[in-house]
Amino acid sequence: MNPPINEMMQSQIQIEDDRTGLSIETLRRAMADNLFYILGKYPAIANNKDYYMALAYTVRDRLLHRWLNTYEAYMKPEVKIVCYLSAEFLVGPHLANNLINLGIYDQIRQAVQESGLNLQELINTEEEPGLGNGGLGRLAACYMESLATLEVPAIGYGIRYEFGIFDQEIREGWQVEITDKWLQDGNPWEIIRPESEVYINFGGRTEPYQDDQGNYRVRWIPEYVVKGIAYDTPILGYKVNTANTLRLWKGEACESFNFQRFNVGDYYGAVDTKVYSENLTKVLYPNDEPVQGKELRLQQQYFFVSCALQDMIRIHLTESENLDNFGDKFAAQLNDTHPSIGVAELMRLLIDVHHYSWDQAWDITQKTFAYTNHTLLPEALEKWPLSIFGRLLPRHLEIIYEINRRFLDQVRMKYPGNNEKLSCLSLIDDRGEKYIRMANLATVGSHKVNGVAALHSELVKKTILRDFYEFWPEKFTNVTNGVTPRRWMVVSNPRLSELITSRIGDNWIKNLDELRRLEQFVDDGHFRYQWREVKWGVKQDLANYIEDKLGIKVSPDTLFDVQVKRIHEYKRQHLNVLQIITLYNRIKHNPNLDFTPRTCIFGGKAAPGYYMAKLIIKLINSVAEVVNKDPDVRDRLKVVFLPDYNVTLGQRVYPAADLSEQISTAGKEASGTGNMKFSLNGALTIGTYDGANIEIRQEVGEENFFLFGLKTEDIDQLRAKGYNPWDYYYNNPELKSTLDLISSGFFSHGDCELFRPLVDSLLHSDPFFLFADYQSYLECQDRVSQAYKDQEYWTKMSILNVARMGKFSSDRSIKEYCENIWYAKPVPIEMKDYVQADA
Ligand code: GPU
């Protein structure tokens, strides 16, 4: 029997309330409801995963009004939208961050608790979306969060990889890669938007034709077409109504069945296109820098960039008659060169599809794009063989040739007869096999080019883009990276955050410069005591985790010395290992040495094909095995390699560190962002004069930073005069015995061959100057050990680090991008529905 109509109305209102209400009772009912009606389970048969899902849907219900209001507001013609184009978004787990940013953490905790569950346990069951390799992808995620917090309209465009960065297991000390099936249990945070589908062409040929008005045009007759489907994830600002969108694209076949083939009985042929199309977004390339020159990678890049640009055009045309103001409606940021094919694609869309003239199209394109460079490593500069490129994107090749022709004409005008300049600046490298140079395409097609730290931006102008800087000095600028204090302090380090808030209030969360007010408490003994207690508690948590996962006992009373980041020779994890072996040697030679006990913690993934990086992981684990069980060491030195380092694990590790290892060869680390996360959580840095280390040191004061090693110029000079690692080996007895110990098979059960490639590389070329920095590094570590003995002094330095790190909020970075590159402004979101944001 149907209920009477007014009762139905009432129950509808009841449903609405259950989806938005925030009372403990309503939240509990909503979770139970989602558990039953979405997960299809009742409490008796539900596990933590089910409860996590039920809770996630409960939270999602509570952000949908904000999300839809935000989306609607951005449709207004006068609103400028920042489009962050990135092949990677390493967003990390959503639940805890969304609770914090919605301001409903406490209510949810209580509701979960009253349902007999533990919120932290549910938070820990979330599988993070590993849609990035490292710093570059994580930066994109921090920037999306800051854009939302600053109420700046933004869409992140990227790829919805079915398999993200591999899970790392360690077997017998070696890295083993396991497929990351992050979507296996479903993803409660995304909403599919089938109405936003787009079609992407590949291959085939081009053909000139005359249109009805007699205009000369070109059409692209592709070999095959793939459908792009949009999946949206909300990105919440902190305690504002803004909920921006991360729109990730999945490749699908145009027809899931090719019926013609099916009808002639070719069943497998018919399914073929489907399999082929879905391969496109199957897996993230697990290489950090350098990226691999594989055709599928170029297909991925073109796919998501074309999806994004077509989507932007569709958005623009719902409110405007034409695309004349496209560059006022959108600012498109190229996150490194991975999306730089966008320059040619926007030209194609404007000219071939929307019939703009070349000059109009070019004005719009340059106005729209800006390019961020993230590396100087020569092997990481992206270039595509002309053969692959032309086969896949024949029309874009023509367009790039035309961009190049016009650009080189300008160059000739400025430098008559200078063929050297032409060959450096050309978009085509034709010194042997021909290549398209993606950094050159990005630079020519953008109105601004930026590096990611002061030193890096200077080096961009002096090295890889020197000739472009000479040609267009005004295009070049710097925006030093930043990280979001919401995830990297409030979410990951609640104890420190509460202590800070107890003294200076909570405005620092949105205005990180306010941390300076902590300086007034450095001489307050009780405050220092509380500061140490917080750090000790967080270290104890990490110690428990380590014992749980690895069975290694470590003490929070030791100095936690941490290096977590991708494994790369330029980042020099092996320099850290050389130092550890040296300390071990010292203990062995003098068992009663006055020694500051240390726990050396490593974490990070190696690209699966990067042999040397994998050997470094094996070395760390081999040294750990020997050192950790040597009775002479008496627990004064422990080495731990944490498997499967990712955002989730980073959230445990940064808060627990005393010492942050930032020891790249000077000039090689563009910025680093882990360095900022450590310092914001009270770790002191031991670091080289590189990337953002320089600016961190400048901010926190040189007396609160452990600097060592050669500077970029020193390294250049040394290289120029002829660097010989053997000199260091023979002249430094500690260095020699450290290397000899590795070579002797001491750490490899007598196998003298195992680490030979690593030792030989150091002795014969040492491309990253470990030996040149070794002595300076060891002396600096001695200063660290001395300083740590004076806990009061160390605590003061720790407090001052945090107090002076305000600059490194990604909010500051985003404000600089808005002001100098995007010309975008905040658009506060008014709630049109009955649900108002919390004050
Ligand atoms: N970075 Br290029 C990556 O993580 N992956 C890349 O492919 C390239 C750069 C990093 C830089 O190494 C790091 O120094 C920087 O902080 C980060 O990008 C964000 O800018």
Image: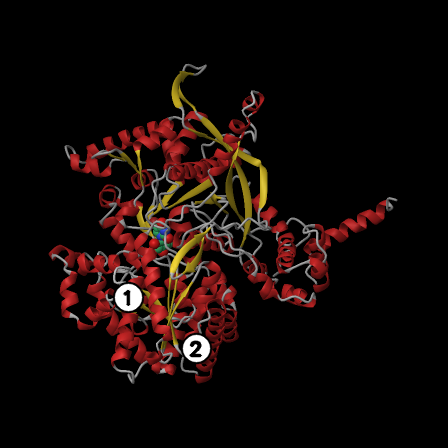
435 lies left or right of 191: left
- Whether residue 433 is visible, yes or no, is yes
Residue 297, horizontal then vertical, whole percent: 39, 40
Disc 1 crowd, CA 10 A, few/some/many (<14, 14-19, 20+): few
Residue 337, horizontal then vertical, whole percent: 35, 43
Q: Is mark 2 within 8 Å of ligand 1?
A: no
Give the quadrant of residue 482.
bottom left
Residue, far front:
750
275 lies left or right of 374: right
Task: Classify the position of the C terminus by image quarter.
Answer: bottom right
Q: What is the secondary structure assignment of the residue under circle 1?
A: loop
Give the quadrant of residue 567.
bottom left
**What scheme was used to colour the molecule?**
secondary structure
Give the quadrant of residue 733.
bottom left
Mark 2 or mark 1, whichever is nearer to me = 1
The residue to which callout 2 is attached is 555
Q: Amino acid at mark 2?
A: Ser
Task: Classify the position of the N terminus by image quarter.
Answer: top right
Residue at the (70%, 51%) spot, across then down:
40
Residue 430, horizontal then vertical, whole percent: 23, 33
The residue to which callout 1 is attached is 750
719 lies left or right of 280: left
